[in-house]
Image (cartoon, rainbow, N blue to C red):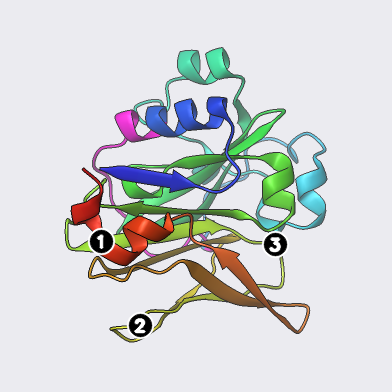
Amino acid sequence: MVLRKHGASGLSIALAVLSVALAFGCGGGEDGSSRDVLARGSVPPASPLQESFAVFRGPRVAADEVPSSLLPRKIADQVGLDLSASRLARRYQGNAVYLVSSADLVCTYSRSNEVGNCWPIPTVESGLATATSICGLGGGADEIVTYGIVPDGVTEVTIPREKEPDRTVAVAGNVYVGATSARPPLPLRLTFVEDGKRVVRPTGIPPDIARKGCGSAG
Protein backbone atom coordinates (compact mmCIF):
# COMPACT_ATOMS: atom_id res chain seq x y z
CA MET A 1 0.00 0.00 0.00
CA VAL A 2 1.70 3.19 -1.19
CA LEU A 3 0.70 6.84 -1.25
CA ARG A 4 3.22 9.16 -2.86
CA LYS A 5 3.21 12.96 -2.73
CA HIS A 6 5.13 15.73 -4.43
CA GLY A 7 6.58 18.37 -2.14
CA ALA A 8 4.75 17.33 1.04
CA SER A 9 6.10 18.06 4.52
CA GLY A 10 6.13 15.69 7.47
CA LEU A 11 2.97 17.30 8.84
CA SER A 12 1.27 16.95 5.48
CA ILE A 13 2.06 13.25 5.47
CA ALA A 14 0.46 12.91 8.88
CA LEU A 15 -2.61 14.77 7.67
CA ALA A 16 -2.81 12.59 4.59
CA VAL A 17 -2.83 9.51 6.78
CA LEU A 18 -5.51 11.16 8.93
CA SER A 19 -7.66 11.82 5.87
CA VAL A 20 -7.40 8.17 4.86
CA ALA A 21 -8.31 7.02 8.37
CA LEU A 22 -11.44 9.18 8.43
CA ALA A 23 -12.70 8.38 4.93
CA PHE A 24 -15.59 5.91 4.50
CA GLY A 25 -18.89 5.85 2.42
CA CYS A 26 -21.23 8.79 0.89
CA GLY A 27 -23.01 9.70 -2.40
CA GLY A 28 -23.75 12.33 -5.07
CA GLY A 29 -22.87 13.51 -8.60
CA GLU A 30 -19.56 13.98 -10.38
CA ASP A 31 -18.63 17.62 -9.88
CA GLY A 32 -19.07 20.42 -7.39
CA SER A 33 -20.45 23.04 -9.76
CA SER A 34 -24.09 22.79 -8.59
CA ARG A 35 -24.55 24.99 -5.50
CA ASP A 36 -28.29 25.12 -4.98
CA VAL A 37 -28.13 25.45 -1.18
CA LEU A 38 -28.74 28.87 0.41
CA ALA A 39 -25.62 30.89 1.16
CA ARG A 40 -24.37 30.60 4.71
CA GLY A 41 -22.02 33.34 5.78
CA SER A 42 -19.57 35.53 3.92
CA VAL A 43 -16.52 35.14 1.75
CA PRO A 44 -13.81 33.16 3.58
CA PRO A 45 -10.84 34.98 5.10
CA ALA A 46 -8.51 36.62 2.58
CA SER A 47 -6.07 34.12 1.14
CA PRO A 48 -3.35 34.30 -1.52
CA LEU A 49 -4.99 31.21 -3.01
CA GLN A 50 -8.07 33.20 -3.99
CA GLU A 51 -6.23 35.01 -6.77
CA SER A 52 -5.44 31.89 -8.81
CA PHE A 53 -7.99 29.33 -7.59
CA ALA A 54 -11.63 30.17 -8.27
CA VAL A 55 -12.85 27.47 -5.87
CA PHE A 56 -11.76 29.70 -2.97
CA ARG A 57 -13.53 32.83 -4.29
CA GLY A 58 -17.13 33.92 -3.91
CA PRO A 59 -19.61 33.25 -1.11
CA ARG A 60 -19.32 30.06 0.90
CA VAL A 61 -22.50 27.95 0.94
CA ALA A 62 -23.86 25.17 3.11
CA ALA A 63 -22.66 22.50 0.67
CA ASP A 64 -19.07 23.60 1.36
CA GLU A 65 -19.23 22.45 4.97
CA VAL A 66 -17.27 19.27 5.68
CA PRO A 67 -19.39 16.73 7.61
CA SER A 68 -18.11 16.17 11.14
CA SER A 69 -18.22 12.43 10.47
CA LEU A 70 -15.54 12.94 7.83
CA LEU A 71 -13.41 15.52 9.63
CA PRO A 72 -14.30 16.16 13.29
CA ARG A 73 -13.79 19.76 14.37
CA LYS A 74 -11.64 18.69 17.32
CA ILE A 75 -9.16 17.02 15.00
CA ALA A 76 -9.24 19.91 12.52
CA ASP A 77 -8.49 22.35 15.34
CA GLN A 78 -5.62 20.23 16.60
CA VAL A 79 -3.84 20.41 13.25
CA GLY A 80 -4.85 23.99 12.42
CA LEU A 81 -7.30 23.35 9.58
CA ASP A 82 -9.80 26.17 9.03
CA LEU A 83 -13.18 24.48 8.61
CA SER A 84 -14.88 27.87 8.19
CA ALA A 85 -13.14 28.24 4.81
CA SER A 86 -13.62 24.69 3.46
CA ARG A 87 -14.93 24.31 -0.09
CA LEU A 88 -16.68 21.55 -1.99
CA ALA A 89 -14.50 21.27 -5.07
CA ARG A 90 -16.09 18.36 -6.93
CA ARG A 91 -17.33 14.80 -6.59
CA TYR A 92 -15.52 11.58 -7.40
CA GLN A 93 -17.36 8.27 -7.62
CA GLY A 94 -20.32 9.98 -6.00
CA ASN A 95 -18.33 11.26 -3.02
CA ALA A 96 -17.68 14.92 -2.26
CA VAL A 97 -14.08 16.11 -2.49
CA TYR A 98 -13.45 19.05 -0.15
CA LEU A 99 -10.56 21.48 0.02
CA VAL A 100 -9.56 22.45 3.55
CA SER A 101 -6.66 24.76 4.33
CA SER A 102 -4.51 25.86 7.24
CA ALA A 103 -1.93 28.63 7.47
CA ASP A 104 0.56 26.31 5.78
CA LEU A 105 -1.31 23.58 3.91
CA VAL A 106 -4.14 22.80 1.55
CA CYS A 107 -5.72 19.35 1.93
CA THR A 108 -8.20 17.27 -0.03
CA TYR A 109 -10.71 15.33 2.07
CA SER A 110 -13.18 12.77 0.76
CA ARG A 111 -14.90 9.55 1.70
CA SER A 112 -13.14 8.26 -1.42
CA ASN A 113 -9.95 7.95 0.59
CA GLU A 114 -7.77 7.45 -2.48
CA VAL A 115 -8.01 11.21 -3.12
CA GLY A 116 -6.97 12.41 0.34
CA ASN A 117 -3.70 14.34 0.67
CA CYS A 118 -2.11 17.62 1.84
CA TRP A 119 0.37 19.97 0.20
CA PRO A 120 2.22 23.09 1.38
CA ILE A 121 0.55 26.25 0.11
CA PRO A 122 3.58 27.24 -2.06
CA THR A 123 3.36 23.81 -3.73
CA VAL A 124 -0.30 24.43 -4.56
CA GLU A 125 0.36 27.96 -5.80
CA SER A 126 3.13 26.62 -8.06
CA GLY A 127 0.80 24.09 -9.68
CA LEU A 128 2.75 21.19 -8.19
CA ALA A 129 0.00 19.75 -5.99
CA THR A 130 -0.14 16.24 -7.44
CA ALA A 131 -0.33 12.80 -5.86
CA THR A 132 -1.03 9.23 -6.92
CA SER A 133 -2.58 6.45 -4.86
CA ILE A 134 -1.38 3.03 -5.97
CA CYS A 135 -1.40 -0.61 -4.92
CA GLY A 136 -4.99 -0.68 -3.70
CA LEU A 137 -4.85 2.30 -1.33
CA GLY A 138 -8.51 3.26 -1.20
CA GLY A 139 -9.26 2.35 -4.82
CA GLY A 140 -9.25 -1.03 -6.52
CA ALA A 141 -6.13 -3.18 -6.55
CA ASP A 142 -6.17 -3.08 -10.35
CA GLU A 143 -6.08 0.71 -10.64
CA ILE A 144 -4.10 3.77 -9.64
CA VAL A 145 -5.63 7.18 -8.98
CA THR A 146 -3.77 10.37 -9.88
CA TYR A 147 -5.24 13.62 -8.55
CA GLY A 148 -4.36 17.15 -7.54
CA ILE A 149 -5.11 20.86 -7.55
CA VAL A 150 -4.51 23.11 -10.56
CA PRO A 151 -4.92 26.88 -11.03
CA ASP A 152 -7.62 28.70 -12.98
CA GLY A 153 -7.49 28.25 -16.72
CA VAL A 154 -6.57 24.55 -16.61
CA THR A 155 -9.66 22.72 -17.88
CA GLU A 156 -8.33 19.18 -18.24
CA VAL A 157 -5.38 17.02 -17.28
CA THR A 158 -3.90 14.13 -19.27
CA ILE A 159 -2.17 11.10 -17.75
CA PRO A 160 -0.03 9.49 -20.50
CA ARG A 161 0.19 5.70 -20.45
CA GLU A 162 2.45 3.40 -22.47
CA LYS A 163 0.40 0.19 -22.64
CA GLU A 164 -3.11 1.62 -22.57
CA PRO A 165 -4.81 4.76 -23.91
CA ASP A 166 -3.87 8.06 -22.31
CA ARG A 167 -6.43 9.25 -19.76
CA THR A 168 -7.75 12.82 -20.01
CA VAL A 169 -10.00 14.06 -17.22
CA ALA A 170 -11.89 17.30 -16.69
CA VAL A 171 -11.03 19.74 -13.92
CA ALA A 172 -13.86 20.77 -11.55
CA GLY A 173 -13.39 23.19 -8.69
CA ASN A 174 -9.65 23.36 -9.51
CA VAL A 175 -9.38 19.63 -8.73
CA TYR A 176 -8.79 16.72 -11.12
CA VAL A 177 -8.99 12.97 -10.48
CA GLY A 178 -7.97 10.31 -12.98
CA ALA A 179 -8.03 6.54 -12.51
CA THR A 180 -5.94 4.34 -14.79
CA SER A 181 -4.76 0.75 -14.83
CA ALA A 182 -2.23 -0.56 -12.30
CA ARG A 183 -0.50 -2.42 -15.13
CA PRO A 184 3.17 -1.31 -15.35
CA PRO A 185 4.82 0.80 -16.40
CA LEU A 186 2.95 3.28 -14.24
CA PRO A 187 2.92 6.94 -15.31
CA LEU A 188 5.71 9.18 -14.07
CA ARG A 189 4.22 12.39 -15.46
CA LEU A 190 0.99 14.16 -16.33
CA THR A 191 0.35 17.11 -18.61
CA PHE A 192 -2.00 20.05 -18.94
CA VAL A 193 -2.20 23.35 -20.82
CA GLU A 194 -1.84 26.58 -18.85
CA ASP A 195 -1.74 30.03 -20.48
CA GLY A 196 -1.41 28.35 -23.86
CA LYS A 197 1.65 26.36 -22.86
CA ARG A 198 1.99 22.62 -22.27
CA VAL A 199 3.00 21.92 -18.67
CA VAL A 200 4.49 18.63 -17.45
CA ARG A 201 4.27 17.58 -13.81
CA PRO A 202 5.40 14.44 -11.90
CA THR A 203 2.77 11.99 -10.69
CA GLY A 204 4.74 11.29 -7.52
CA ILE A 205 5.35 7.60 -8.33
CA PRO A 206 9.00 6.54 -7.79
CA PRO A 207 10.66 5.32 -11.02
CA ASP A 208 11.37 1.82 -9.67
CA ILE A 209 7.73 1.26 -8.69
CA ALA A 210 6.56 2.81 -11.95
CA ARG A 211 8.70 0.34 -13.86
CA LYS A 212 7.78 -2.84 -11.94
CA GLY A 213 4.32 -2.00 -10.65
CA CYS A 214 2.77 -2.73 -7.27
CA GLY A 215 4.59 -6.04 -6.97
CA SER A 216 7.77 -4.06 -6.25
CA ALA A 217 6.26 -2.15 -3.29
CA GLY A 218 6.72 -4.83 -0.67
Query: Where residue 192 sits: x, y (%)?
Result: 61, 76
Secondary structure beneath dot 3 equals loop
Kindly report which numbered mark, 3 or 1, lies closer to the viewer in this rendering. Answer: 1
**Residue at point 57% right, 46% down?**
38
Find the magenta span and give its range.
19-33
Q: Earlier in the sequence, mark 1 or mark 2?
A: 2
Q: Which residue is mark 3?
A: 151
Disc number lying in front (2 or 3): 2
* Vertical side of 168 occupied by 17: above or below: above
- Position of 158 with respect to 58 (left or right) is left
How packed is label 1: few (under 14 Cα within 10 Å), some, or many (20 or more)? some
**Was residue 27 drawn as part of the magenta stretch in this picture?**
yes
Magenta span dominant secondary structure: loop
Q: Quadrant of the N terminus?
A: top left
Q: Quadrant of residue 186?
A: bottom left
Q: Is residue 147 above or below residue 113?
A: below
Q: CA distance from mark 3 to mark 1?
A: 30 Å
Quadrant in which the C terminus is drawn: top left
Q: Residue at x 25, y 61 (%)?
A: 213
Magenta stretch: includes residue 74: no
Q: Position of residue 156 (x, y in %)?
A: 55, 76
- Mark 2 and mark 3 lie on one chain; the one further toward the N terminus is 3
Sequence-first disc among 3 and 1 = 3
Badge 2 crowding class, 10 Å Cα cut-off, few under 14, some 14 to 19, many 20 or more, is: few
At 75% from the left and 41% from the top, the residue drawn is: 43
Residue under numbered circle 1: 213
Please determine whether, in this image, residue 158 is positioned above or below residue 202. Answer: below
Residue 94 position within the rendered picture, expressed as x and y whole percent measured from the top left: 31, 57
Residue that carries the numbered disc 2 in the rendered image? 162
Q: Is residue 5 above or below residue 93?
A: above
Q: Amino acid at mark 1?
A: Gly
